[in-house]
Image: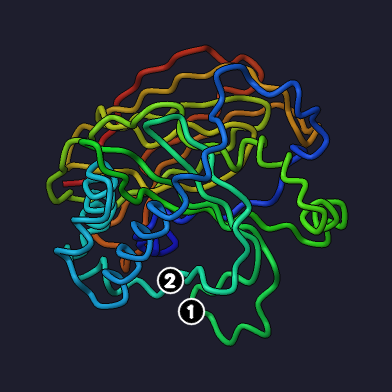
Amino acid sequence: MQTFRVLLTALLISTLSNSLAQDPMTAESGAAQPDNSLRVTLESTYETWRRSIDTNDLSLWEQSTAFSRQIETRNRIVSQKMPFPKALFDDPIGAPPLAGLISLGVLSTGDTATSTYFGKINLGEGDGGSIPDNLLVLHFLKEEGRWLFDNLRIVKIGNDGELLFQIRNRDFSFLRGEEFQPAKVLPPIPQPIENPDFVAEAWIDATGYEVTLTVNGRLTGTFKNLKTTELVIGGLRKGENTVKLDIQSAKASSGGTPKVEIAIYAAPSSKDPAQRVYHYSPGANVPPTISETFATGQ
């Protein structure tokens, strides 16, 4: 099992989808609306959060981070049997500064918001000269009347000349794409977890399907048209564990043969060799729901 790096920001890195090819007039009704009046407030919140990371200030981090994200971050760390809050500030991924980036706009639902930037996004990986231009999307949630930082996404643009042309001409219609939208609603507050017996990781192949994976009653994630790995929040316990899969068809973006395959690997710690403890591969006959139990060693 590969060692899972703690991502304190729930950092997401993706490539630009075909949002540029979509007609801006066909955007989903009820979608977030532009609201650049929030920009200064959101940037102030983000800079406070960034300062908390740079100075290892837990109190400042709690003041500037959405409560749901605080618990989720702690749960990810504890699921890896790592110490909280020490591991929070040991993460090698830096909090990128906004200086030098171009603001492209703010989208808001009233309770959630995103603020998007273009330029060289420095995650502490070296000098700015070697960093390519990409897009940075900051996510925020409004809790008890205050805007708080949630997470960030880096959208890689590669050699997309059409996008660069649009940015130069201040045509930001591509912000209607899914990558730049804030959450539709405030997320539920997760329950804090206890230290698990085993660190666990799920390997998911959801080609042509959307699969929601729940382990021991805790959501691991929803995966659509991809192959990926994901940390099992809460890990596994000694003895009997439960797994639930909710599966529905989704158009395969790659044109590959539809397939569902799920495997779960477990180890006493992220540094120990992992063993496969659960495997599901139904072949061509994929039921919409499956609930099973499996055991881990004592």
* Placement of the N terminus among the 4 image quadrants: bottom left
Question: Residue 84 has which mark?
Answer: none
Q: Secondary structure at mark 2?
A: loop
Left or right of 72, for residue 220: right
Left or right of 89, for residue 175: right
Residue 106 figure quarter: top right
Colour convention: rainbow
Residue at the (37%, 37%) spot, across then down: 220
Closer to us: 241 or 102: 102
Which amino acid, by three-letter code, is at mark 2? Answer: Ile
On the image, the x and y values in percent for residue 24 come to: 76, 29
- Determine which residue is flagged by label 2: 93
Which comes sooner in the sequence, label 2 or label 1? 2
Closer to us: 5 or 132: 132
Residue at the (55%, 18%) spot, across then down: 30
- Determine which residue is flagged by label 1: 124
| In the depicted structure, whether residue 291 falls above or below residue 194 | above
Which amino acid, by three-letter code, is at mark 1? Answer: Gly
Closer to us: 204 or 188: 188
Q: Secondary structure at mark 1?
A: loop
